Image (tube, helix red, strand yellow):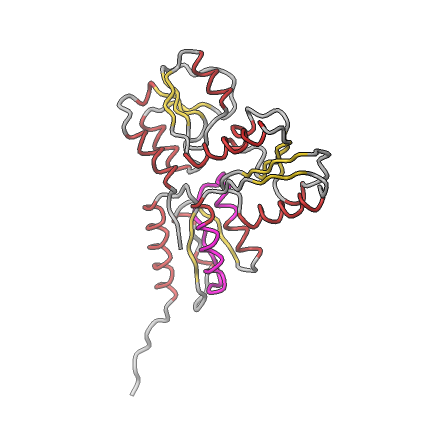
Amino acid sequence: MAHGMCFGVRDALAATQQIEHPSNVTIYGELVHNESVQAALAARGFVQMAEGARELPQTDAVLITAHGISGLERGRLASAGLQILDTTCPLVRNAHAAALALAAEGRFIVVIGMEDHVEVRGLTGDIDNFIVIADARGVVNFGAGRIGVVSQTTTAPGVFAEALGMIFTKNPEADIRVMDTICKPTRDRQEGLAELLPQIDVLVVVGGKRSRNTHELAAAAANAGVAAYHIQSAADLDASWFAPDVVVGLTAGTSTQDETMHAVHAKLLEIERSMAPTPQPCVS
């Protein structure tokens, strides 16, 4: 099934490789929710700015991550004379444009996503009249005649669909316009996982602890009754999770490096070999 870094994250990382003097650049938040990548960037000399921090970077340039920021915040950085290196994923840009277009129609904006996620903070930073809900449980009658619905790009399609259905149910009189802003890599992983789950007993999901789409993959497995283990690297694997004859599936979030996946796969094969029965000598 689909795994490894999505093109947005891969392009953002490629952009950092072209920077000759990393110590002159502050990264606005986490470039990617991947701890090993963060450590590598720090080792190269990049300065990291906390997400949502109000102090201005002390470097000459600031790098906007694939998660993006609001236009308001972008303007604040530019007005301070900072050079802006923008690696915002184009699919995140599309989500911003969708939310702004719906707001321009005078609609109350409902964002399906995680309120404290950097992408969602950027998505809502230029909108005055909105609410963020994580799933269907957050839906109420919003008391708005016109509603616009968008989502964080990494929201699981099933979560989006369930929340959307509840929005229509609880707001029957409202004029509701929906713009599906879930990104294709997230959708591909969820669809691939749905095909994989009936064939396996255990799922290993590789990704950062702060990665929304990685958590969604593990949650989907758990909901289907398949034991799921969310790890960050091969070092996190525990042979006691497995038993002979179980079928193990492997997938990863959009922030996981290919080399990490290869290492995890190799370690799983090593664990499998260790469980193989020892051949017994023939006795005549």
Q: Quadrant of the C terminus?
A: bottom left
Q: Nearer the viewer, residue 273 or 65?
A: 65
Whether 190 is drawn above or below 119: the answer is below
Would you identify the image quadrant in which residue 126 lies? Answer: top right
Whether 267 is drawn above or below 174: the answer is below
Place of residue 159 in the rendered image (x, y in percent of width and height, measured from the top left) = 58, 47
In the rendered image, residue 202 lying in the magenta stretch gets the answer yes
In the rendered image, residue 203 lying in the magenta stretch gets the answer yes
Q: Quadrant of the N terminus?
A: bottom left
Residue at the image position 67 percent from the left and 46 percent from the top: 166
Whether 4 is drawn above or below 127: the answer is below
User: Could you tell me how many numbered marks the image carries?
Assistant: 0
Q: Nearer the viewer, residue 201 or 212?
A: 212
Residue at the image position 49 percent from the left and 26 percent from the top: 51
Place of residue 247 in the rendered image (x, y in percent of width and height, measured from the top left) = 44, 64
Is residue 45 shown left or right of residue 34?
left
Would you identify the image quadrant in which residue 143 lies? Answer: top right
Identify the magenta region. Answer: 188-216
Residue at the image position 51 percent from the left and 31 percent from the top: 118
Residue at the image position 34 percent from the left and 71 percent from the top: 278
Place of residue 26 in the rendered image (x, y in percent of width and height, measured from the top left) = 39, 21
Whether 225 is drawn above or below 49: the answer is below
Would you identify the image quadrant in which residue 30 lies? Answer: top left
Q: Nearer the viewer, residue 23 or 138?
A: 138
Q: Residue furthest bottom?
A: 284
Is residue 115 shown left or right of residue 169?
left
